[in-house]
């Protein structure tokens, strides 16, 4: 019996990678759904956006690069579509150097999706054309995010005299009378790096706007203390957070699809952790016996 | 170069070419630029597989993809910095001629001679490339370090220290109306009195024991040692939660790549 566990301990890690890939592909292709349990920290973001009156402005900071696309893009798609279906206006920024491409792609895809009638949570939303400058304003990218966040607190036009497409902000209908964070209902930072710290310290800390975070799984645990202290009002962690939001918005997408894979991949990893631990303790016991 | 290496490289090029042709053919009905799009998808799939090949062992394909990623990222960052900051912010505020040249709207009302100060400091930074006057680049660097330290000290002191410390001053008795009332209304609801009190006790003792673990001026024995052990358990649970989220994050990335390979490239998943 001991030898089986010891074999597991000596197993070449490449076999584990291969097994994981096979399980992931199978789970991705399989047709079944798993229940998504909604956490309060995700629900609070959904409820906040859902309670806003039409015409209010939500600031969405798309602060991630393509390497975090798999986790954070589903969040962007679910939140932005929710905002636009509720007739909210959105200001986008991208303070990560590869972020503008992410934001641009998301805006184009969601604008296409908005053209058709859809029913969410039993309510039929008529399809409509999403217009730049009317439904959204994309500020684009500027380096040194800390200073940009501080600058936007004075006036959005300070770091961004023109939007991403080169149009002066004053020429955009939705930006008339919008000076700084005072005219914004909340800021949602979707981030895969340290820009989040700057949003908490320089943004929420100085200007006091409601801030919610959508983070990669690796970062999530680190930011829970800010939820407890009330510095942020909501937190979505990784693909699970995105799946929770998709589930709340009744808009299933890639995150809910990915949960099937997560389930089986986690089972495989847990299995190998248990086997490895049993093997370790069994070999220790065997060594002690041999010494006696 | 070894014969096997050459054969593998030739094989990779041939497979790449076949994949490009097949992908372009499958895209003819969806886009006018099917050859370019076919190339982009095939090249992205090739780079994904190059990166994954590191799981088997280090190899020239992985190195190629890694170096390409670093080079492209650096070039993209520099390009974005030039177009978004110098062309996007500086030129529209200081020069009409240059604004017309770069085709960006001129904002004469925003003109301020102080905008030339960062230009001057930026040029000083570039002097680092010179051996003779490279030392001058330390001045703008000192300016950057000084202002960043000043900004961060004040703001992080407030958001990461004062706010966090004050968040641990939580009431240990929540909505307390006597022990009889507490037991008669005992509920495990997440919004109930019991759970609220329990979480506050965990925060209070967790922080206390965690700090004790890092207090090295007294030997960790007796009650102090016990608290220190609880402290290390609290830390381990935190690291465990963090590890769990990390695993989820990595699997999410794998899901993203599998989706790309099997859906966008091979079209095996609808």
Image (spheres, rainbow, N blue to C red):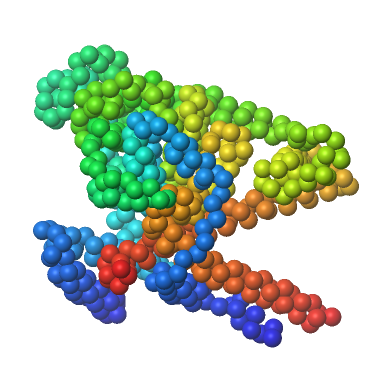
Q: Nearer the viewer, residue A230 or B217?
A: A230
**x and y, in percent, of residue A200 in the image:** 50, 33
**Residue at 69% across, 83% down:** A2
Q: Is residue B69 above or below residue B165?
A: below
Q: Where on the picture, by quarter, is residue A224?
A: top right
**x and y, in percent, of residue B203 in the image:** 71, 41
Q: Is residue A64 above or below residue B166?
A: below
**x and y, in percent, of residue A258 in the image:** 43, 62
Q: Does residue B118 show up?
A: no
**Residue at 69% across, 86% down:** A1
Q: Where on the picture, by quarter, is residue B138?
A: top left
**Residue at 67% across, 76% down:** A279
Q: Where on the picture, by quarter, is residue B54?
A: bottom left
**x and y, in percent, of residue A194 in the image:** 47, 40
Q: Quadrant of the C terminus of chain A?
A: bottom right
Q: Is residue B243 above or below residue A83?
A: below
């Amino acid at each position: 019996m001991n030898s089986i566990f010891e074999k597991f301990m000596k197993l070449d890690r490449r076999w584990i990678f291969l097994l994981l890939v096979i399980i992931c592909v199978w789970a991705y292709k399989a047709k079944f759904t798993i229940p998504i349990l909604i956490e309060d920290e995700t629900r609070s973001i959904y409820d906040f956006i859902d309670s806003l009156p039409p015409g209010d402005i939500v600031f969405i900071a798309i602060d991630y690069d393509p390497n975090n696309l798999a986790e954070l893009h589903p969040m962007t798609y679910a939140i932005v579509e929710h905002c636009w279906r509720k007739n909210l206006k959105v200001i986008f920024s991208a303070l990560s150097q590869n972020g503008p491409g992410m934001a641009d792609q998301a805006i184009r895809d969601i604008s296409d999706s908005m053209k058709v009638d859809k029913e969410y949570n039993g309510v039929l939303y008529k399809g409509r054309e999403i217009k730049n400058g009317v439904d959204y304003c994309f500020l684009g990218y500027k380096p040194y995010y800390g200073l940009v966040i501080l600058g936007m607190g004075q006036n959005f036009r300070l770091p961004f005299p023109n939007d991403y497409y080169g149009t002066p902000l004053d020429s955009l209908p939705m930006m008339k009378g919008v000076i700084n964070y005072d005219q914004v209902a909340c800021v949602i930072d979707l981030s895969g790096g340290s820009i989040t710290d700057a949003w908490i310290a320089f943004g929420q800390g100085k200007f006091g706007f409601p801030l919610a975070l959508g983070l990669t799984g690796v970062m999530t645990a680190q930011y829970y203390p800010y939820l407890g202290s009330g510095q942020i009002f909501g937190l979505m962690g990784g693909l699970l957070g995105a799946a929770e939001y998709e589930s709340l918005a009744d808009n299933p997408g890639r995150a809910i699809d990915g949960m099937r894979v997560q389930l089986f991949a986690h089972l495989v990893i847990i299995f190998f952790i248990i086997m490895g631990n049993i093997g370790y303790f069994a070999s220790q016991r065997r060594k002690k016996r041999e010494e006696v | 170069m070894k014969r096997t290496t050459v054969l593998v490289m030739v094989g990779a090029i041939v497979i790449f070419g076949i994949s490009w042709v097949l992908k372009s053919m499958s895209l003819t009905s969806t886009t006018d630029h099917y050859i370019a799009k076919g190339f982009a998808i095939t090249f992205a799939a090739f780079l994904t597989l190059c990166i994954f090949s590191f799981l088997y062992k280090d190899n020239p394909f992985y190195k190629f993809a890694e170096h390409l990623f670093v080079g492209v990222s650096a070039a993209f960052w520099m390009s974005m910095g030039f177009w978004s900051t110098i062309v996007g912010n500086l030129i529209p505020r200081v020069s009409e001629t240059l604004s017309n040249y770069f085709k960006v709207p001129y904002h004469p009302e925003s003109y301020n001679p102080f905008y030339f100060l960062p230009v001057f400091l930026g040029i000083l930074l570039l002097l680092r490339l010179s051996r003779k006057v490279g030392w001058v680049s330390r001045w703008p660097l000192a300016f950057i370090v000084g202002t960043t330290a000043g900004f961060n000290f004040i703001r992080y002191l407030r958001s990461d220290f004062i706010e966090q410390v004050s968040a641990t001053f939580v009431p240990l008795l929540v909505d307390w109306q006597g022990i009889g009332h507490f037991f008669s209304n005992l509920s495990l609801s997440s919004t109930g009195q019991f759970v609220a009190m329990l979480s506050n006790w965990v925060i209070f003792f967790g922080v206390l024991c965690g700090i004790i673990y890092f207090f090295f001026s007294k030997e960790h024995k007796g009650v102090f040692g016990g608290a220190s052990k609880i402290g290390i358990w609290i830390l381990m649970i935190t690291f465990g939660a963090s590890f769990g989220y990390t695993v989820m994050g990595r699997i999410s990335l794998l899901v993203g790549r599998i989706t790309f390979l099997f859906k966008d490239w091979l079209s095996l998943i609808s």
